Image (cartoon, grey):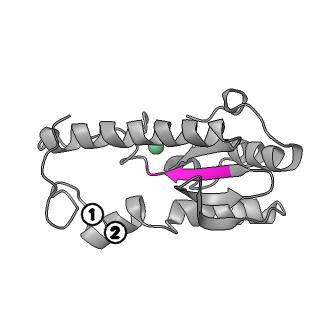
């Protein structure tokens, strides 16, 4: 795959957000989406580790003992089907980048599942506010044990 050169500051120019807003929203740890999901899980009585590496992969929310890993995926960077509105310019930059992200997501999910983890990939938009069904699925997985991700509707 050919890679387009990355802009110097890591943030492509066409987004209507400032660099810091952008980084906070889509890339950073402790994004608003992540914090919102975390507090919903906490309210359910769940306790977890943050930004832990499991099987060499940094997951956002980790439940070590039931082996549940949760990723909060930014709608933009991870290519959410509902919010996939991309700038028309710079396609050469965006398209390969986003395809790469999706491939990496699915590789990481598979690697964790192979190692016996239940993996949830939750869209940013499902966290603001937290989607009750998503929260319940995570609660059940943590209390009941491993589920097939096919049954829990992760993307
Ligand atoms: Zn979305």
Tag 2's secondary structure?
helix
The reply to whether the C-beta atoms of the residues labelled 2 and 1 are less than 8 Å apart is: yes
Q: Is residue 114 above or below residue 19?
A: above
Viewer-proximal residue, 29 or 49?
49
Q: Is residue 131 above or below residue 41?
A: above
Viewer-proximal residue, 136 or 68?
68
Q: Quadrant of the C terminus?
A: top right
Q: Give the labeled residue for mark 1.
A: 17
Q: Magenta span: helix, strand or loop, mainly? A: strand
Q: Give the labeled residue for mark 2.
A: 21
Magenta stretch in the rendered image: 69-74
Q: Residue 133 in the image: x percent, y percent?
A: 72, 41
Q: Is residue 47 above or below residue 139?
A: below
The residue located at (34%, 66%) in the rendering is 23
Query: Which residue extends farthest top?
Result: 150
Between the C-alphas of marks 2 and 1, the distance is 6 Å
């Amino acid at each position: 795959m050919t890679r387009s050169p990355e802009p110097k500051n890591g943030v492509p120019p066409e987004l209507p957000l400032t660099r810091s807003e952008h980084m906070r929203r889509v890339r950073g740890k402790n994004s608003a989406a992540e914090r919102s999901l975390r507090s919903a899980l906490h309210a359910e009585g769940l306790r977890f580790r943050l930004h832990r590496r499991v099987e060499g992969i940094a997951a956002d929310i980790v439940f070590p003992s039931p082996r549940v890993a949760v990723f909060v995926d930014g709608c933009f960077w991870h290519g959410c089907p509902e919010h996939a509105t991309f700038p028309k310019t710079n396609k050469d930059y965006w398209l390969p980048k986003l395809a790469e992200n999706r491939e990496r997501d699915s590789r990481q999910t598979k690697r964790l599942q192979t190692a016996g983890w239940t993996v949830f990939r939750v869209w940013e938009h499902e966290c603001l506010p937290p989607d009750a069904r998503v929260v319940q699925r995570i609660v059940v997985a943590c209390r009941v044990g491993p589920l097939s991700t096919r049954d829990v509707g992760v993307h």
